[in-house]
Amino acid sequence: MDPNTPWQSRDPLGEALHLLRMSGTLYCASEFTAPWGLGLPPLEDCLMFHVLTAGECWLEVSGHDPLLLRTGDLALVPHGQGHSLLSATDVAAVPLFDLPRECLSERYEIIRHGGGGAPVSLVCGAVRFDHPLARQLVRLLPSLLHVEAVNAEHADWLQGTLRFMRDEARAMRPGGETVVTRLADILVIQAIRAWIARDPAAQTGWLGALQDRQIGRAIGLIHRDPARDWSLVSLAEAAAMSRSAFAARFTALVGEPAMQYLTRWRMNLALGWLQEGEVAIAVLAERLGYQSEAAFSRAFKRCHGYSPGAVRRATG
């Protein structure tokens, strides 16, 4: 059983959402006055978000038309793509790291910038997801997610959270940056949940498979107990299906055979643990159900293209 998954459910999609635990790379309360422009650089493996707590601004992301954000709106750029926030679409963007900032903690800062016109306030952030299941879910998100405050399913709750966030960002009482970052994390998860609920794309592929009663059960068992000596037969039995029907349905929904998915899941877990630098390779092999370190290392290299030792040396 995965020691990093203390909570389990009969709902595989619920487990994936539960594991959307974020580690914040950067959080920023921004206070701008028109005209102003802010250029965000690409940030690999990061999801970037913007919560507009007051005013209006434009968001420009390559491949999308300029998007007008209004008070209470939330925008996610899930794949770390560079983008711009602007008071108007004809304003030049100043690179983020060229602007002066007030650092309140290691990961929280305040930026003030602009020409003295109409004010705008935002809370922005760049976060990473540590668990392989969370990272797999985030990879499936579109390149831009927009939650409009006026159309949000739970508008009252959203607005209450935003007011709380805005007040904390302005007052900055002791511990205020912690409150703001936790509220931002909740809003990000809510945006992802809203996308899953409303977008037809979330009902197909891996996400659709998680929501399938039989295939979802098999995927959940793989996630919770990767070390078990799973076979196509045992997974089919757990899903209450024949071997042939299970194999065909799993591949059709997930896009790869069940045993290939099992191996890839094990190797993604192994990569995460190796990057944390705390577990010996032999221990990892045992934890993931391999009879020898050599067998584990071969499987790891086939999956990732490099050896577990190379990861250990790079993170050591």
Image (spheres, rainbow, N blue to C red):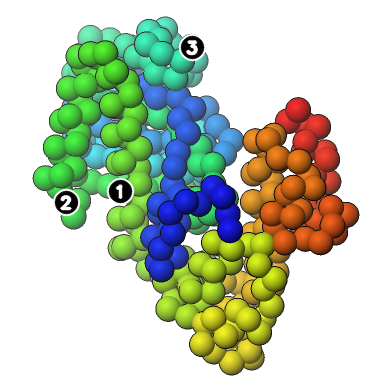
Left or right, 150 with reference to 41: left
x, y percentage for residue 246?
A: 58, 85
Measuring 37% from the left and 21% from the top, which residue is drawn there? 28
Residue that label 1 marks: 190
Is disc 3 surrounded by few (<14), some (14 to 19) or many (20+) residues within 10 Å?
few
Give the residue type at disc 2.
His
| Pick the front one: 140 or 284 | 284
Q: Where is 190 relative to 169, above or below?
A: below
Residue that label 3 marks: 98
Q: Nearer the viewer, mark 3 or mark 1?
A: 1
Give the residue type at disc 1.
Gln
x, y percentage for residue 60?
A: 40, 36
State the CA–CA distance, disc 3 to disc 2.
37 Å
At numbered mark 3, what does the secondary structure look like: helix, strand or loop? helix
x, y percentage for residue 133?
A: 53, 54
Residue that label 2 marks: 154
Image quadrant in which the C terminus is located: top right
Give the residue type at disc 3.
Asp
Identify the mark at residue 14; answer none if there is no mark.
none
Residue 204 visible, this orientation: no
First of labels 1, 2 by sequence position? 2
First of labels 3, 2 by sequence position? 3
Q: Quadrant of residue 90?
A: top left
